[in-house]
Amino acid sequence: MFLTGNFERSLDEKLRLALPKRIRELVNSKDPLVLTVGTDNSLALFTQAAFAAFAQKLAARSPTGHDVRAFSRLLFARSHSVEIDSQGRIRLPAELAQMAGLERDIMLLGVGDHMELWNKSRWEAYLADLTPRYDELAENALGDVPAGNSSSIQLPTLTAALPSQPR
């Protein structure tokens, strides 16, 4: 499963978020999802399988490393299983919503193996800050691609990479 796109969404007063139909079709709505603290003041939403794969990568790191132990504690202690209800919604735990500064208007972003939930105004500021550096970021992120393989990488345009989806 490969999650892409961005979706403007609204949280209701009970902190419920309606997942877009396209996303619900990609995940098994009978299986709980895992919601946890993400990076850059966002929340990360994983399928059980994707979260297990992420946890395995973390477990492969040295458990004696201070950062590994600290990150593991912070990640797993603040991870919650969330169910998709019959109307295609998940309910965010209040402490996670508060931690990420999520208010009524949020953005749901596909980030490959997981989704991110952002405060809409924070996402817009982040996007405005980084969009002019897209080429530089691409070069830095893909700079370690072995010679000979770089021709097979096609970078999308920003409009193709970040299509806005209706509510």
Image (spheres, rainbow, N blue to C red):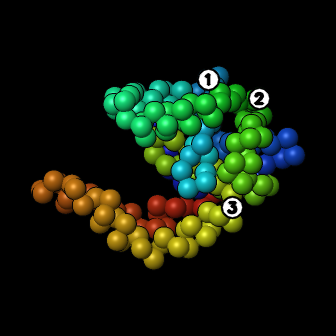
In the displayed orientation, state which residue is furthest to the right.
13
Label 2 secondary element: loop
Residue type highlighted by circle 2: Ser
Residue type highlighted by circle 1: Asp
Q: State how far apart marks 2 and 1 are (Cα).
A: 12 Å
Residue 99 pos. (x, y %): 69, 48
Q: Name the residue under label 1.
A: 31
Q: Name the residue under label 2.
A: 86
Q: Pick whichever of labels 2 and 1 is earlier in the sequence.
A: 1
Q: Residue at x 56, y 67 (%)?
A: 126
Residue 146 pos. (x, y %): 16, 53
- Work out whether residue 69 or residue 122 is closer to the camera in this orientation and state it: 69
Q: Name the residue under label 3.
A: 120
Asked whether the beta carbons under mark 2 and mark 1 sit within 8 Å of each other, the answer is no
The answer to whether one can see residue 117 in this image is yes
The number of numbered discs placed on residues in the rendered structure image is 3
Q: Pick whichever of labels 2 and 3 is earlier in the sequence.
A: 2
Label 1 secondary element: loop
Q: In this view, does 91 lie above or below 98?
A: above
